[in-house]
Image: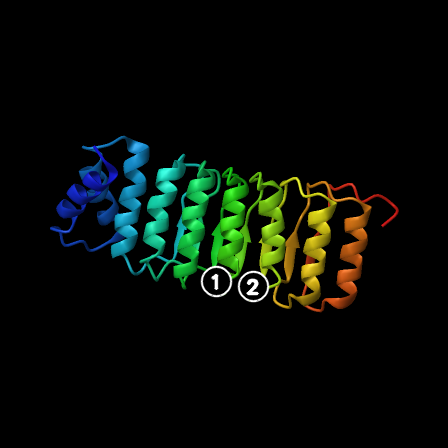
């Protein structure tokens, strides 16, 4: 059965019930949808329906639940409509590039989410570029965690460049993403103009002495950064 048919059929069932709590919404949604699809797929849709109707939930932690790209897309649809959620943790859900792109596209329309954790989701280059594009347009998000996502060269460059335009993000974690000197230098240069970021975590990458020197130069010009983690890189003694 096609996604649209499953959603329409289930949505009709759910909207006939007068829900009073998030728990009731989710349980009824799951009960209706599990008849038509597998558990991983339907849980994402159930959460989408619940979040589209719920206006009290502010924090959702759903890490390590194997949502996959379809679950990520369903939650992205919900983010386009929900205006109460301020914190979302999707750590380790195998969202992949398409799921990451869907979340990124939702950030362009969403103006309530403040904290987003997308660590360990294999977002890849396309996911990284999409999130960079979102950061150029979204100034509501203040905390973004992209640890361990294999963002690729173009994705990493796009994120570094996005910091030139973004003026909402205060904390960015890009640990263990294979950042090399060129990206480290680009990030450091962005700190010359970015005045809102106060925490940058780039530990566990492959930043060498040139990147170390670039960050040292940036710190001489930046007055906003209060926390910079460069541990577990290869900066050496020449920086």
Q: Is residue 148 visible?
A: yes
**Which dot marks residue 146?**
none
Local crowd at mark 2 within 10 Å, few (<14), some, or many (≥20)?
A: many
Left or right? Give the position of 12 relative to 155: left
Q: Which image quarter: residue 150?
A: top right
Q: Residue at x 71, y 43 (%)?
A: 180
The residue where tag 1 is placed is 138
N-term-proximal mark, 1 vs 2: 1
Q: Name the residue under label 2.
A: 166
Is the C-beta separation of discs 1 and 2 under 8 Å? Answer: yes
Rounded to the nearest whole Å, what is the CA distance between mark 1 and mark 2?
Answer: 7 Å
Question: Residue 58 location in percent, x, y?
Answer: 38, 58
Quarter holding residue 191:
bottom right
Residue beneath the point at 68% across and 48% down: 183
What residue is drawn where x is 53% and y is 49%?
A: 129
Q: Which residue is drawn at 56% across and 61% down?
A: 169
Name the secondary structure under disc 2: loop
In the drawing, does residue 222 fall left or right of residue 168?
right
Q: Is mark 1 on a helix, strand or loop?
A: loop
């Amino acid at each position: 059965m096609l996604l649209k048919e499953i959603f329409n059929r289930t949505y009709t069932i759910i909207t006939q019930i007068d829900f009073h709590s998030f728990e009731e919404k989710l349980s009824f949604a799951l009960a209706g949808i599990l008849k038509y699809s597998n558990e991983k797929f339907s849980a994402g849709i159930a959460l989408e329906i619940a979040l589209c109707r719920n206006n009290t939930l502010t924090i959702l932690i759903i890490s390590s639940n194997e949502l996959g790209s379809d679950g990520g897309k369903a939650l992205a649809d919900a983010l386009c409509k929900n205006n109460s959620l301020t914190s979302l943790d999707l750590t380790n859900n195998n969202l992949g590039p398409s799921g990451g792109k869907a979340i990124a596209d939702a950030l362009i329309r969403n103006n309530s989410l403040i904290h987003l954790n997308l660590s360990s989701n294999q977002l890849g280059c396309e996911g990284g570029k999409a999130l960079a594009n979102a950061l150029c347009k979204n100034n509501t998000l203040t905390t973004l965690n992209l640890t361990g996502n294999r963002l690729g060269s173009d994705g990493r460059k796009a994120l570094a460049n996005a910091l030139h335009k973004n003026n909402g993000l205060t904390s960015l974690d890009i640990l263990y993403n294979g950042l090399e000197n060129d990206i480290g230098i680009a990030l450091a240069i962005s700190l010359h103009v970015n005045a809102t970021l106060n925490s940058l975590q780039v530990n566990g990458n492959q930043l060498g002495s040139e990147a170390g020197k670039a960050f040292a130069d940036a710190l001489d010009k930046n007055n906003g950064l209060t926390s910079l983690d460069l541990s577990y890189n290869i900066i050496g003694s020449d920086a």
